[in-house]
Amino acid sequence: MEKFTVLEGVAAPLKLVNVDTDMIIPKQYLKTIKRTGLGTGLFSEMRYKDDGSDNPDFVLNQSAYKNAKILVAGDNFGCGSSREHAPWALLDFGIRCVISTSFADIFYNNCFKNGILPVVVSKDDLDKLFDDADRGANATLTVDLAAQEIRGPDGGVVKFEIDPFRKRCLIEGLDDIGLTLEKAPAIAAYETAKGAEQPWL
């Protein structure tokens, strides 16, 4: 998993509440178990018209936000079914951080397991970040995980809280497999000792 330390990039405003996982990545894209290629399906029902052409009104199709790395979104982001394809699609598009006042629990947990930082902020702070994001190409935010702060283009700072264990996992790039591999020497030593004690196993 790619490490997350400091992320600087354009923030796209998605001023919708209750964005569910089917809106993030519709069901027709769930046939694959690969984590790549899903970026084209991200928010596809809003991004594309019926004929497959881009919807110019959708924020991620606007030139200022096509390379957004941060998403500033409304309340209860990631609700609905527990599809891990949702964070995969965000990551494949290039979004490494989602900021909202609240997230659905399963989506929130899946983000950490896939190298995405979900940041919970207050309503007032979210409004400030929406104002920053509305600046288009000038909507550059810096998300500093070590310092637990978001710095805006005018020097404003928003602090956020995060579980220390999850913070360490993101900074060190450790997913569940990486955490298990950290214990590889202890596992190998146990297997060697067990084999000596019970060689018939």
Image (spheres, rainbow, N blue to C red):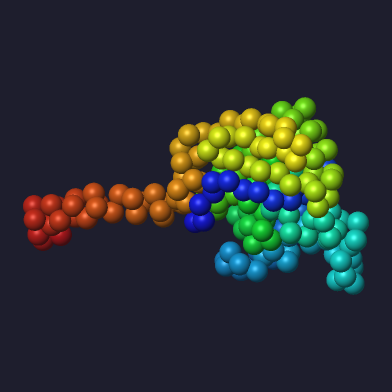
Left or right of residue 62, residue 121 in this image: left
The relative height of residue 107 versus residue 33 in the rendered view (above or below) is above
Left or right of residue 198, residue 154 in this image: right
Q: Residue at x 84, y 60 (%)?
A: 63
The C terminus sits in image quarter: bottom left
Using the image as rendered, state which of residue 184 and residue 85 is in the foreground: 184
Can you give x and y, in whole percent of width and height, for residue 18 in the image?
77, 41
Q: Residue at x 22, y 55 (%)?
A: 188
The relative height of residue 181 versus residue 118 in the rendered view (above or below) is below
- Occupied quadrant, residue 61: bottom right
Can you give x and y, in whole percent of width and height, for residue 133 in the image?
80, 44
- Occupied quadrant, residue 78: top right
Report if residue 175 is visible in the image: yes
Can you give x and y, in whole percent of width and height, for residue 89 in the image?
66, 59
Using the image as rendered, state which of residue 17 and residue 140 is in the foreground: 140
Q: How many marks?
A: 0
Q: Residue at x 66, y 58 (%)?
A: 94
Single out the residue that lies furthest toward the front: 155
Q: Residue at x 66, y 43 (%)?
A: 142
- Occupied quadrant, residue 145: top right
Using the image as rendered, state which of residue 196 and residue 72 is in the foreground: 72
Can you give x and y, in whole percent of width and height, for residue 40 in the image?
73, 66
Report if residue 19 is visible in the image: no
